[in-house]
């Protein structure tokens, strides 16, 4: 990035950070956003998806600016594209995806940008059953290339659940979602300040591949 572009970006981020709690910049409230996601997922499960508005005019309208109503942090797994499983169209979801749905500094910055600049007030961290990243972390084998960087941030969840009864991948998957929610809260004052004021919500979720259900849950 050249110096001018960098200064412009910093200036615009500074402006948006200071206006993060200005009502007019907010997309919709967390309760409205969660209803939209739940209703969209119900349509998808029932095979009655509306697929959002994918018309040329809707696309052209979206080019003027974006105000996604929710941020979805989820796994890169090819079977759980958020726009499909929550039945949403262009411009509705701000998606942060990485195998194992963990959040590093770049992902955290992406989330903060969507909150501060785009007005999103709902963050869903969505894990899923049969997650290859969690399974690899549980198995703990040596991994080639940079794949170890994917499993490393899941390790804490794997260790915390190692003595629990039942399937370890299942319990580690849920714990990893809870860890990621807590990490977003503790790692971002932009997020935690708004959540303390009741203006933003971070929730967890688990996606089931065959039924298509994305069950959302509260994380303390
Ligand atoms: Zn996965």
Image: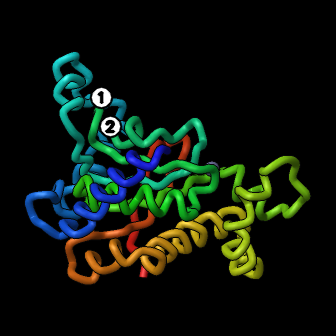
The residue where tag 1 is placed is 51
Q: Is residue 218 above or below residue 52?
A: below
| Whether the residue under disc 1 has CB within 8 Å of ligand 1 | no
Q: Residue at x 30, y 50 (%)?
A: 37
**Label 2–label 1 contact, CB within 8 A:** yes
Furthest residue in direction left, as rendered: 24
Q: Residue 118 placed where, x, y %?
A: 25, 53
Which label was assigned to residue 87? 2
Q: Residue at x 23, y 62 (%)?
A: 15
Foreground residue, 217 or 66?
66
| Whether the residue under disc 2 has CB within 8 Å of ligand 1 | no
Q: Residue at x 27, y 38 (%)?
A: 91
* Image quadrant where one finds the C terminus: bottom left
- Mark 2 nearby-residue class (10 Å; few <14, some 14–19, many ≥20): many
In terms of secondary structure, where does tag 2 sit?
loop
Furthest residue in direction front, as rendered: 3
In terms of secondary structure, where does tag 1 sit?
loop
Q: Residue 63 placed where, x, y %?
A: 23, 29
Furthest residue in direction top, as rendered: 56
**In screen coordinates, is 116 left or right of 147?**
left
Measured in 3D between alpha carbons, the distance from the residue under mark 2 to the one under mark 1, in whole angstroms, is 6 Å
Image quadrant in which you'd find residue 49 = top left
Foreground residue, 17 or 59?
17
Image quadrant in which you'd find residue 60 = top left
Q: Is residue 167 visible?
A: no
Q: Is residue 159 visible?
A: yes
Foreground residue, 177 or 212?
177
């Amino acid at each position: 990035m050249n110096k001018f572009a960098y200064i412009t970006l910093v200036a615009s981020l500074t402006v948006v950070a200071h206006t993060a709690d200005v009502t007019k910049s907010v997309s919709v409230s967390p309760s409205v956003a969660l209803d939209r996601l739940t209703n969209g997922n119900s349509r998808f499960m029932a095979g009655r998806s509306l697929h959002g508005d994918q018309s040329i005019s809707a696309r052209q309208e979206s080019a003027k600016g974006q105000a996604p109503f929710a941020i979805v942090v989820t796994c890169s797994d090819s079977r759980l594209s958020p726009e499909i499983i929550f039945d949403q169209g262009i411009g509705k979801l701000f998606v942060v995806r990485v195998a194992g749905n963990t959040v590093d500094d770049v992902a955290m910055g992406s989330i903060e940008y969507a909150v501060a600049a785009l007005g999103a007030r709902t963050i869903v961290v969505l894990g899923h059953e049969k997650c290859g990243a969690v399974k690899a972390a549980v198995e703990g084998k040596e991994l080639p290339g940079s794949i170890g960087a994917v499993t490393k941030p899941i390790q804490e969840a794997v260790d915390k659940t190692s003595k629990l009864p039942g399937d370890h991948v299942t319990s580690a998957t849920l714990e990893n979602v809870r860890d990621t929610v807590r990490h977003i809260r503790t790692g971002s004052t932009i997020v935690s300040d708004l959540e303390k004021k009741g203006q933003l919500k971070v929730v967890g979720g688990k996606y089931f591949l065959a039924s298509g259900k994305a069950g959302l849950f509260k994380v303390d």
